[in-house]
Image: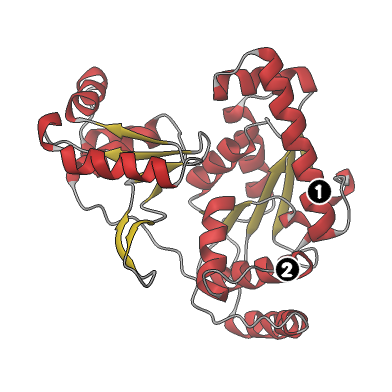
Amino acid sequence: MSLITISGEPGCRQAEVARLVAQTLQFELITESRLETLLSEEFGAGNEIPDKAYPAAVASVLAHLATGHHLVAAVAGAELIFVRFANVLRAHVVAPEASRIGLLMIDRRLDRPSAKKALKEMETARRGLRKRRFGRATVDPHAFDLVLNSENLDVEAAAAVLCAAADQRGLREGGLLSAAAGAQFQFRLRLDLAKHGIQPNGRAQLKHASFGHPSEEIFANLLDFYRIAWEYEPRSFPVAWDKDGRVLESFTPDFYLPEFDLYVELTTMKQSLVTKKNRKVKLLRQIYPGINIQVFYEKDFQNLVFKYGLTAERAEART
């Protein structure tokens, strides 16, 4: 099993670094949002995992996946989970506060006071979550093999350093987690999870996008070209229920962009013909006011394609 864990201080773009590392090494990328989906599959949707059981639950899911894939885990605290495994590279991205505020201003389109406030809120939330899940609010630098300063290293440079370290360690050539080793590891994890009344079912699987329309593949290639992390149809939102509370209708946006916390619904139909879809989007916004969603119409999409001369094949060749 080869595993690279990449965490970082809020505002350091560590998710972008992780995505580029996974793409370069051809490892599977596990983001926070993708992990949440896998945990739901493994332990049941709606079953909240106690904070004390979180490390064992994450370890169970990642170990299950590691029998078939090498992994890049862009998950806070993952460096503390596989401490006894040899083929694990643990990296942490840091930067001075002023640098992180500047990046948040760019990434979230905030003014400086708003970015500074957002950073403080993110740091407070992160410390609280680490304390509850791992028993320590602060990050121990000795838990990492590499600590990278993003003030001096951009995303590409940081990813290049990590890939070089991975190659020096021979992670690309490393074997997958054997079934026997995985079973032994899972046995210990099951004992730990059983204390919390939790039982993994081995159902978590990595799913690759099977696009329903060629325009979706082109859009995904465009996002890849600009190294924008995306997930395809990751979540369905119920928008209509019967009198007994059973879901009658759901809406599944085409893409989710985790770096922007934005859902994108792509339509290449004429704008005059998408009234029904617009109504669903409007309804979703009313029912889930905290969800950010944007509709890309035919004109928006074509402008991007024509501007950059992208087709599905050409965009793929440039990634």
* Amino acid bearing label 1: Gly
- Residue farthest along the front direction in this orientation: 243
Report the residue marked by disc 1.
128
Q: Residue at x 54, y 74 (%)?
A: 42
Residue 43, by quadrant, is: bottom right
Screen quadrant of the N terminus: bottom right
Say left or right for 44 vs 59.
left
Say left or right for 68 vs 136.
left
Q: Position of residue 48 (x, y in %)?
A: 64, 68
Say left or right for 51 vs 75.
right
Q: Position of residue 275 (x, y in %)?
A: 17, 38
Q: Is residue 47 visible?
A: yes
Q: Secondary structure at mark 2?
A: loop
Q: Nearest the camera: 278 or 301? A: 278
Q: Nearest the camera: 270 or 106? A: 270
Binning the other alpha carbons within 10 Å of mark 2 as few (below 14), some (14 to 19) or many (20 upward) gives: some
Q: Position of residue 34 (x, y in %)?
A: 52, 55
Report the residue marked by disc 2.
50
Real-space Cα distance between discs 2 and 1?
14 Å
Q: Is residue 94 visible?
A: no
Q: Residue at x 76, y 44 (%)?
A: 126
Q: Earlier in the sequence, mark 2 or mark 1?
A: 2
